[in-house]
Amino acid sequence: MSVIAFEEIFNSSSSSSKIEKPYTFTAMLIHGLLGCRDDFVDFAKSLVSSLSTDWRMVVVDLRNHGSSVDREDVVIGHSVGGKIALQYASSCAHGDYGDSAQLPKQVWALDCVPGKVENKSHYEEMEKVFHTLQTLRSPIQSQEWLVEHLMNLGFSKFLSEWISSSLKKSGEHMTFSFDIDGVIHMFESTRNSDYWLLLEEPPKGIEICVVRSESRVTWDPNVVKRLESLASRENDESRGKVSVHVVPRSGHWIYKDEPERLLEVMTPKIASLIQPKL
């Protein structure tokens, strides 16, 4: 079994007292396909700074990506990482990990459709990306060269820069910090995964928070309607909760496009997990 690389981030004001007063709560952040834990570092720092010193953030590199931890109170995943976060919650609820993991109190799925995504154009774009990366000539000279090369192939500047950000130095040349064949396998594995049942009957004690963009490409109106119906149900103490949040004017990478708006959504809910001292 391979080791999962991760990085811990604490509130800067707590660094001097970390030994005397260790963290109490943990949030784990999971990046999406072709990314790495560095994608979430800036947002994780902003999030932990907006919370009390009781919190730590753990940003991880998924299997096949980039260079595990005790119980997580909050699990945050973007895109494919969101589906992995939902799977983690489902596995905890079913006792798949035995006593080694407890159900998180909150799971955040950022711009992640919980069921099967039927949008063919999205798959076609990803398949084009995969094919390009598989057939890319090596060695890669530089990030600048790769950005220009990808843009000449018709990819957007944002996507080209995002893909090139996963390059790392290897001798005199550059290589990717992910394994493309492993990434493709993960994509195929998650594209048909379906977590609607988890949202329809969330385990007691958990809140599943879905944050979406306004994109009609990603978010079919029927999917949006189904989510809002689940979120508007009356509270039932026998099961957990579902909440849905929209970040206006954001693209797929919500935590990079609109980090301040996302913090406005997430910070109060995460902070509410700390019970006030009597």
Image (spheres, rainbow, N blue to C red):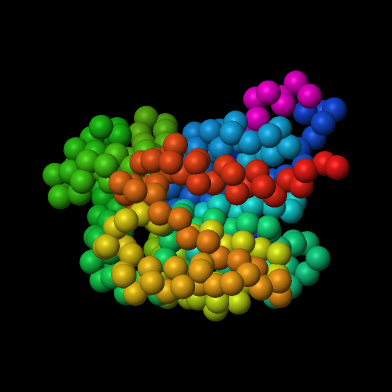
Residue 130 is left or right of residue 35, and the answer is left
- Position of the N terminus, as image quadrant, is bottom right
Query: Residue 13: within the magenta?
Result: yes
Q: Main secondary structure of the magenta part?
A: helix
- Position of the C terminus, as image quadrant, is top right
Magenta residues span: 8-17
Q: Where does the image place residue 161, in percent across and percent down from the top left? A: 29, 39
Q: Nearer the viewer, residue 203 or 171?
A: 203
Q: Quadrant of residue 139?
A: top left
Q: Where does the image place residue 93, in percent across and percent down from the top left? A: 69, 71
Q: Where does the image place residue 153, in percent across and percent down from the top left? A: 15, 49
Look at the image and tell me whether residue 61 can be seen: no
Q: Residue at x 71, y 24 (%)?
A: 15
Query: Residue 20: within the magenta?
Result: no
Look at the image and tell me whether residue 236 can be seen: yes
Residue ranking furthest to the front = 234
Residue 185 is left or right of residue 200, and the answer is left
**In the picture shown, does residue 101 fall above or below 163?**
below
**In the picture shown, does residue 22 fall above or below 83?**
above
Residue 97 is left or right of residue 232, and the answer is right
Q: Nearer the viewer, residue 8 or 277?
A: 277
Q: Residue at x 55, y 76 (%)?
A: 200
Q: Nearer the viewer, residue 270 or 195?
A: 270
Q: Where does the image place residue 23, in percent across and percent down from the top left? A: 76, 38
Number of marks in the image?
0
